[in-house]
């Protein structure tokens, strides 16, 4: 009996690996196109596209772009922006004069001011200069008029107008005869000299105390200021003690001929591309519900940190010896400014810079909470340790000159109801208004005219 022949089964052919790779890539492309279509149909396209974000345009406007002394851009440096700064042997770098954008104007002297500043001031002018880094400059503010300097100038000149229009609202030049009347008039706001107040923004993003000292001695002093406001300290905590001031970040490696490795460059390029995918943003935003940071919140804009350290926390001093060295440097620079103040008989008001981790957990906005989450617990812990030392150093400097005062602003926004911070070192326009009011109140206290006794 014959057996039926059952033909042999042919094994299924194994598909090559690139077939599955192509299938995965094709599926991802399809999902990405679908995500973009859904975003367009639902009107969410601007939320995913950085190109259409007004906040991104604002960040690009304030990002520094560095030039050589010959005026040529350092094209190989990362994050080159629209706010041009030229390398300076005395100050590290300084802003290029006569440039402007939608949000800021730099005058012919390199100050953030709509008008030029002449070396000789008018006889009736009280000239106040603002020095410092990003916050003093007014980083991410909507315009020159929203900065601390501009709002402070308005407050002082408005008081002069108010004094002239309503003299009885302020303390009189001469006290009344009776004690009860004296007590009443002293309850009124103090009167300041009725002159023209000019507040000039000479701050530069990223400057630390060493840069401020150089700018004061080399440039600002030539304009005969009556008072100097210094708003800094934060940048000194981030700057390694080996440096006396901030310089163009990454320039040393560039001049030495060093380059990022191809692997590192490729990794950053791929990561940036992946983060821009609508599919990735949609998963993070709606499935994982991750806090969405604007670009200004996600990077320490114009803070001159060590480029080898990936986070702000790692740029803060990790041990007591390094922290002490940074604090000592800060104190020494302030001391030299105080000696200038004493010798020139000019007033110096030192403001200890506000900082986001001081925000109260009850008042902090979701956007600010997202910034803090990105900064991490290590950042907050190191800042908490560092700021008391900064305050102590600044207060020690007041002993060198009777013309120096310190304004502790670190906790200024702790309980504010509104959002104050747009990044670790940038404020909302309202935040700058609050800061200007603090300086205004301190200046009025210093300039207040003491009423003469009756019959005196």
Image (cartoon, grey):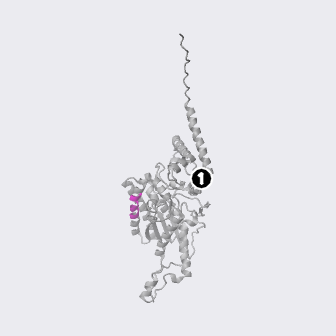
Q: Is residue 224 visible?
A: no
Query: Is 384 included in the stretch rendered in magenta?
Result: yes
- The furthest residue to the front: 1
Q: Is the stretch drawn in magenta largely helix, strand or loop? A: helix
- The residue at the point 52 percent across, 67 percent down is 433
Give residue 125's quadrant in the image. Answer: bottom right
Residue 279 locus on image (x, y percent): 56, 46
Q: Is residue 387 magenta?
A: yes
Residue positioned most to the left:
320
> Can residue 3 be seen in this snapshot?
yes
Percent coordinates x, y for residue 1 in the rendering: 53, 10
**Residue farthest along the top direction in this orientation:** 1
The residue range painted magenta reads 383-392
**Residue under the point 47% across and 48% down:** 308
143 or 129, which is in the foreground? 143
In the rendered image of this protein, does residue 453 appear above or below residue 380? below
In the foreground, 430 or 78 = 430
In the rendered image of this protein, does residue 6 appear above or below residue 129?
above
* Number of marks: 1
Residue 418: image location, x then y, percent = 50, 64
Q: In which quarter of the view is residue 32 placed? A: top right
Res 240 quadrant in image: bottom left
Give how far across and how far down residue 453 sits, in percent: 44, 86
Taking depth in this image into account, of 424 and 28 the one nearest to the observer is 28
Instruction: Return the residue at label 1.
Output: 44
Neighbour tally class for label 1: few under 14, some 14-19, many 20 plus, Cα within 10 Å: few
Q: Quadrant of the C terminus?
A: bottom left
Q: Tag 1, which secondary structure?
A: loop
């Amino acid at each position: 009996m014959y057996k039926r022949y059952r033909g042999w089964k042919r094994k299924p052919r194994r598909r090559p690996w690139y077939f599955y790779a192509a299938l995965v890539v094709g599926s991802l492309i399809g999902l990405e196109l679908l995500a973009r279509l859904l975003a367009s149909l639902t009107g969410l396209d601007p939320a995913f596209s950085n190109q259409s974000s007004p906040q991104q345009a604002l960040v690009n406007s304030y990002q520094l772009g560095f030039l050589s002394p010959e005026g040529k851009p350092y094209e190989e440096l990362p994050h080159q922006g629209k706010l041009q700064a030229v390398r300076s042997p005395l100050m590290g770098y300084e802003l290029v004069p006569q440039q402007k954008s939608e949000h800021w104007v730099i005058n012919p002297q390199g100050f953030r001011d709509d008008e030029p500043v002449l070396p000789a001031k008018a006889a009736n002018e009280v000239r106040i200069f603002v020095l410092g880094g990003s916050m003093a400059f007014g980083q991410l503010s909507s315009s020159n008029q929203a900065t601390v300097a501009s709002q402070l100038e308005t407050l002082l000149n408005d008081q002069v107008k108010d004094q002239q229009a309503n003299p009885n609202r302020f303390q009189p030049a001469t006290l009344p005869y009776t004690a009860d009347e004296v007590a009443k008039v002293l309850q009124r706001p103090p009167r300041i000299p009725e002159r023209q107040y000019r507040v000039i923004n000479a701050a530069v993003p990223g400057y630390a105390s060493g840069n401020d000292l150089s700018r004061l001695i080399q440039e600002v002093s030539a304009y005969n200021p009556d008072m100097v406001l210094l708003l800094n300290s934060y940048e000194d905590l981030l700057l390694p003690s080996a440096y006396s001031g901030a310089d163009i970040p990454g320039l040393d490696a560039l001049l030495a001929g060093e380059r990022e490795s191809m692997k590192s460059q490729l990794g950053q390029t791929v990561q940036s591309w992946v983060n821009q995918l609508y599919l990735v943003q949609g998963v993070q935003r709606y499935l994982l519900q991750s806090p969405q940071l604007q670009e200004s919140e996600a990077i320490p804009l114009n803070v001159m940190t060590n480029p080898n350290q990936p986070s702000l926390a790692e740029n803060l001093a990790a041990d007591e010896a390094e922290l002490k060295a940074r604090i000592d440097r800060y104190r020494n620079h302030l001391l030299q400014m105080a000696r200038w103040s004493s010798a020139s008989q000019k007033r110096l008001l030192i403001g200890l810079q506000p900082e986001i981790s001081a925000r109260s957990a009850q008042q902090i906005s979701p956007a600010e909470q997202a910034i803090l989450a990105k900064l991490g617990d290590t950042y907050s812990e190191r800042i908490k340790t560092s700021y008391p030392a900064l305050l102590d150093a600044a207060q020690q400097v007041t002993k060198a000159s009777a013309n120096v005062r310190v304004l502790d602003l670190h906790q200024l926004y702790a309980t504010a109801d509104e959002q104050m911070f747009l990044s670790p070192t940038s404020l909302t326009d309202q935040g700058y208004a609050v800061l200007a009011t603090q300086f205004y109140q301190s200046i009025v206290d210093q300039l207040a005219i003491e009423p003469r006794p009756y019959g005196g």
